[in-house]
Image (cartoon, grey):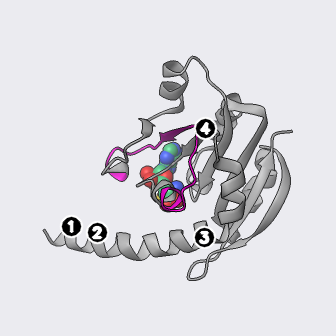
């Protein structure tokens, strides 16, 4: 009971920080998401998608992968959920996506996992990354793509965000 209470308070505070970051990216998100096939890796509670729904921004398909079944509860209608990249690829005949979202997850992933992601992005895909400033060096090590745009997002918590194009 107590754990649930603290979890709720923590989630609410965290949600506000995430919403501030999404708001800062609103014009970019509108262009990147509308009518596109998107893979949101480490989507958690899909707050990004509830935010975009309120802004009337609609993707063609949203696929979400998370490591943890608890982290995605409650699941959001309209999103297709998976718990590994392999599962996503098997169920979708190696489908490739127009936009890969890595929002506050890249620094939690293993290098091997990140390299595997290259297999699911179209040549003309964009990769949207948000991560703590202190971790932005990861982007250079990984060579996921060329930086097309970069900036800072958020108010209470400021992240480094960038848009990559696969090279
Ligand atoms: C900080 S939360 C960010 C959630 C969401 N992207 C957002 O914008 O609020 C990180 C999420 O990534 C998930 N995660 C952590 N490591 C992962 C991994 N290696 N593969 C997939 N998901 C992972 C966690 O379970 C959690 O839901």
Are there few (<14), some (14-19), or many (20+) residues within 10 Å of tag 3?
some
Q: Is residue 64 magenta?
A: yes
- State the separation of the CA atoms marked 4 and 2: 28 Å
Q: From the Cβ of disc 3, is ligand 1 less than 8 Å away?
A: no
- State the separation of the CA atoms marked 4 and 1: 31 Å
- State the separation of the CA atoms marked 3 and 2: 24 Å
Residue 41 is situated, as x and y percent measured from the top left of the image, at: 55, 45
Mark in front: 3 vs 4: 3
Query: Which residue range is magenta in the image?
Result: 51-71
Q: Looking at the rendered structure, which numbered label has been put on residue 23?
A: 3
Query: Given contact means CB atoms under 8 Å apart, are the residues at marks 2 and 1 in contact?
Result: yes
Q: From the Cβ of disc 4, is ligand 1 less than 8 Å away?
A: yes
At x 60%, y 40%, the residue is: 38
**Disc 4 or 1, which lies upstream in sequence?**
1
Query: Given contact means CB atoms under 8 Å apart, are the residues at marks 3 and 2 in contact?
Result: no
At x 57%, y 17%, the residue is: 93
**Disc 1 or 3, which lies upstream in sequence?**
1
Residue bearing the label numbered 2:
7
- Secondary structure at badge 1 equals helix
Q: Looking at the rendered structure, which numbered label has been put on residue 111?
A: none
Q: Is residue 147 magenta?
A: no
Are there few (<14), some (14-19), or many (20+) residues within 10 Å of tag 2?
few
- State the separation of the CA atoms marked 2 and 1: 5 Å
Residue 43 is situated, as x and y percent measured from the top left of the image, at: 49, 50
Residue bearing the label numbered 1:
4
């Amino acid at each position: 009971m107590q754990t649930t209470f603290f979890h709720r308070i923590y989630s609410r505070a965290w949600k506000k920080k995430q919403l501030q970051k999404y708001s800062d990216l609103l014009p970019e998100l509108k262009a990147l998401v509308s009518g596109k096939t998107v893979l949101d890796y480490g989507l958690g509670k899909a707050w990004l998608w509830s935010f975009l729904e309120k802004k009337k921004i609609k993707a063609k398909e949203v696929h979400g992968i998370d490591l943890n079944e608890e982290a995605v509860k409650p699941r959001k209608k309209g999103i297709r959920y998976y718990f590994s990249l392999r599962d996503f690829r098997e169920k979708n005949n190696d489908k490739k996506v127009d936009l890969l979202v890595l929002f506050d997850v890249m620094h939690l992933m293993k290098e091997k996992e990140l390299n595997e992601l290259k297999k699911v992005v179209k040549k003309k895909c964009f990769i949207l990354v948000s991560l703590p400033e202190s971790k932005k060096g990861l982007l250079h090590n990984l060579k996921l793509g060329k930086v097309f745009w970069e900036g800072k997002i958020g108010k209470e918590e400021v992240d480094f965000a960038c848009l990559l194009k696969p090279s």
